[in-house]
Image (cartoon, rainbow, N blue to C red):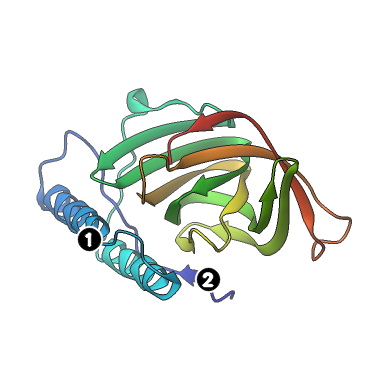
């Protein structure tokens, strides 16, 4: 298993606005903890950021059950194909549920000035990640950094400097994914791009920003 991916056997986040049981209270407590921790980070260095991401994973692992939000709360993803999204914001942290139709996908994008934790709640997805080596007016130079097939219960992370450019594609049965993003500035958010990869996965790729921005 890749070092950046943790295989979990427990679910993460119970989430229904109508729930008022102990699980719901646990969820609110954990969200508050993550938001408070994120608010104290400011501009962490690479080691602090990786430690924070592991801490977020640990907090999410403490929650035993997940309930998918009411479908009425989901909206069409602004750039995805066959994807709907439900967002919840707590301070500088954004929690996103993504519901993928079979073979639905979110094209290549980054999370500028954000880091994130991704958890597969159902189904399966494939991911491809790049590190941004250089950005000029003409485009981006990207270095392949990770690719994975993730099934239910698996978790991965990305930092501001590691694996930040990526795409996500659901399997033939669709998928449900939870993303937890921490934003470090008011300008933080998604930037979508066209990626032209080399014929070999290990080679450098070129990225070109396209119109379209979103939340974290």
Residue where numbered disc 1 is placed:
40
Apparent side of residue 14 relative to residue 179 in the rendered image (left or right): left
Q: Position of residue 202 (x, y in %)?
A: 80, 66
Q: Residue at x 16, y 33 (%)?
A: 18
Vertical position of residue 38 compared to residue 209: above or below: below
* SS label for mark 1: loop
Which residue is found at the position 68% from the left and 56% from the top? 134
Query: Which mark identifies residue 11?
Result: none
Instruction: Tell which tag, 1 or 2, sits nearer the viewer.
Output: 1
Measured from the top left, where is residue 48 in percent x and y? Answer: 36, 72
Q: Residues within 10 Å of mark 2 (few under 14, many from 20)?
A: few
Q: Position of residue 173 (x, y in %)?
A: 59, 42
Q: Is residue 37 left or right of residue 50?
A: left
> Quick one: quadrant of the C terminus?
top left
User: Which numbered disc covers residue 4?
Assistant: 2
Left or right: 206 in relation to 99: right
Q: What's the distance in space between the residues labelled 1 and 2, CA to CA?
A: 24 Å
Q: Is residue 96 above or below residue 127?
A: above
């Amino acid at each position: 298993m890749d070092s950046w991916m943790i295989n979990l056997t427990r679910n993460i986040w119970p989430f229904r606005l109508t729930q008022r049981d102990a699980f719901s209270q646990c969820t609110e407590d954990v969200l508050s903890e993550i938001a408070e921790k994120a608010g104290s980070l400011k501009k962490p260095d690479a080691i602090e950021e990786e430690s924070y991401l592991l801490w977020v994973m640990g907090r999410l692992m403490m929650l035993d059950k997940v309930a998918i939000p009411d479908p009425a709360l989901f909206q069409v993803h602004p750039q995805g194909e066959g994807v709907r999204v439900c967002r919840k914001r707590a301070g500088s942290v954004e929690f996103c549920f993504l519901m993928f139709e079979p073979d639905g996908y979110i094209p290549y994008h980054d999370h500028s000035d954000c880091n994130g934790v991704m958890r597969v709640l159902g189904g399966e997805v494939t991911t491809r990640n790049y590190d941004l080596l250089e950005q000029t007016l003409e485009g981006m130079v990207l270095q392949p950094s990770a690719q994975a097939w993730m099934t239910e219960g698996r978790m991965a992370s990305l930092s501001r400097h590691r694996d930040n450019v990526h795409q996500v594609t659901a399997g033939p049965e669709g998928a449900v994914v939870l993303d937890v993003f921490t934003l470090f500035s008011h300008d933080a958010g998604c930037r979508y791009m066209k990626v032209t990869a080399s014929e070999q996965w290990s080679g450098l790729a070129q990225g070109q920003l396209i119109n379209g921005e979103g939340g974290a």
